Image (cartoon, rainbow, N blue to C red):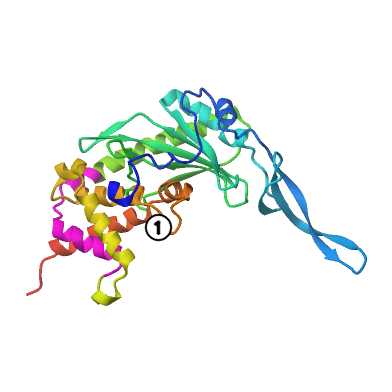
């Protein structure tokens, strides 16, 4: 969306390294520079005396440290098990026979999180080509396990479409993946990933078609924009420049040529918000290349909010008035 100041590119464009063509996780780890390891190291408190320095070991607490550069990634307990990058993602190899292709891989922050982005075969939703993406993540700071996150993307404008759908009401679908050394278990996990991705895409198709069949006017979109910008009920002098800009940018997204075929529908409104949220810049830190990645990959909160507001507005419009 040009008005927001960025080109229309996938959410992962500015992070990681290109891994297109890699045939297995071992190749991915090597090409993306993820072939470093992490180990748990003891933590000590340093005490300064008059003439000497002493150290006290902090019992049952450890630092996770990258062995290639000694970067501390997190503080964990004694039972925390480090899952190395190649170990955490080994199961993805079993997904490749199902049409999954590698796209990007890299680190998030200093290595606390590592990701592999892959795409599944494209599908058609409401006449548009949609590319289902699966984001695989591993953490080294104790914040979580290996995960698979489903992030479908509209091809024509690279908009994320992590939309709530029946059975997937939160909008963001995540599978937490246990580390296993068993080939059989890895195959089972891979099949679960493929199955859940397919189920989510099927549910998304149904939801999109319902939204396309739902009337939603340009005036209603303005009301939606005001709610998203949190200006409802505020006096004009209390509306901030940032709120005004947000409303204007949402309107610009609503007027983009590629969604005019959905004119007068709730599906157009959803696509406009998705465009805005996917491509807007961080006004406080426009140099943060991970901003767009984090906003889309770990949940499109604004899109989920917009969906809820649209549902409420439509239901209120359909509700018979009390005489």
Classify 10 Å Cα crowding around label 1: few (below 14), some (14-19), many (20 and above). few
Which residue lies at the image location 69% right of the left edge and 48% below the top edge?
64
In the rendering, at what x and y percent does residue 245 appear? 29, 61
247 in relation to 159, above or below: below
Based on the displayed image, in which of its 4 quarters is residue 69 positioned? Answer: top right
What secondary structure do most residues of the magenta stretch adopt? helix
Is residue 1 something one can see in this rendering?
Answer: no
Q: Residue furthest right?
A: 51
Question: Which residues fall within the magenta stretch?
Answer: 208-231
Residue 229 in magenta? yes
Give 71 or 146, whichever is nearer the viewer. Answer: 71
Residue under the point 31% across and 51% down: 4
Residue 18 screen position, x and y as percent: 48, 31
Is residue 106 visible to the viewer in this orientation of the structure? Answer: yes
Quadrant location of the C terminus in the rendered image: bottom left
Q: Residue at coordinates 30% horizontally, 42% vertically from top-left? A: 203
The local secondary structure at tag 1 comes to loop
Residue 125 painted magenta: no
Left or right? Give the position of 271 relative to 178: left
Q: How many marks?
A: 1
On the rendered structure, is 169 left or right of 81?
left
Q: x, y percentage for residue 274?
A: 30, 49
Q: Residue 11, percent across and down?
A: 40, 42
Task: State left or right for residue 163 relative to residue 294.
Answer: left
Q: Which residue is mark 1?
A: 283
Query: Which of the two residues, 264 or 164, is positioned nearer the viewer here?
Result: 264
The image quarter containing residue 150 is top left
């Amino acid at each position: 969306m040009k008005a927001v100041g960025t080109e229309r590119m996938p959410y992962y464009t500015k992070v990681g390294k290109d891994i297109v063509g890699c045939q297995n996780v071992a190749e991915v780890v090597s090409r993306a520079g993820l072939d470093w390891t992490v180990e748990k190291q003891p933590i000590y408190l340093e005490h300064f005396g008059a003439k000497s320095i002493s150290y006290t070991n902090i019992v049952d607490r450890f630092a996770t440290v990258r062995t290639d550069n000694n970067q501390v990634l997190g503080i964990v307990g004694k039972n925390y098990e480090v899952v190395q990058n190649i170990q955490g993602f080994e199961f993805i190899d079993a997904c490749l026979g199902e049409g999954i292709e590698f796209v990007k891989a890299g680190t998030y922050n200093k290595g606390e999180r590592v990701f592999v982005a892959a795409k599944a075969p494209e599908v058609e939703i409401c006449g548009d080509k949609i590319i289902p993406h699966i984001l695989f993540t591993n953490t080294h700071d104790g914040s979580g396990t290996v995960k698979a996150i489903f992030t479908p993307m509209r091809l024509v404008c690279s908009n994320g479409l992590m939309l709530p759908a029946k059975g997937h009401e939160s909008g963001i679908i995540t599978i937490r993946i246990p580390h296993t050394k068993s080939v059989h278990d890895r195959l089972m996990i891979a099949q679960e990933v493929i199955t859940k991705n397919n189920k989510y895409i099927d549910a998304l198709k149904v939801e999109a078609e319902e939204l396309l069949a739902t009337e939603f006017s340009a005036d209603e979109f303005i009301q939606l924009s005001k709610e998203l910008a949190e200006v409802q009920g505020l006096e004009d002098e209390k509306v901030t420049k940032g709120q005004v800009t947000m409303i204007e940018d949402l309107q610009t997204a609503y007027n983009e040529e590629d969604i005019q075929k959905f004119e007068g529908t709730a599906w157009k409104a959803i696509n406009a918000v998705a465009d805005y949220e996917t491509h807007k810049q961080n006004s406080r830190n426009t140099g943060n290349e991970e901003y767009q990645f984090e906003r889309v990959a770990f949940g499109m909160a604004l899109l989920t909010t917009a969906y809820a507001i649209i549902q409420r507005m439509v239901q209120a419009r359909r509700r018979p008035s009390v005489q």
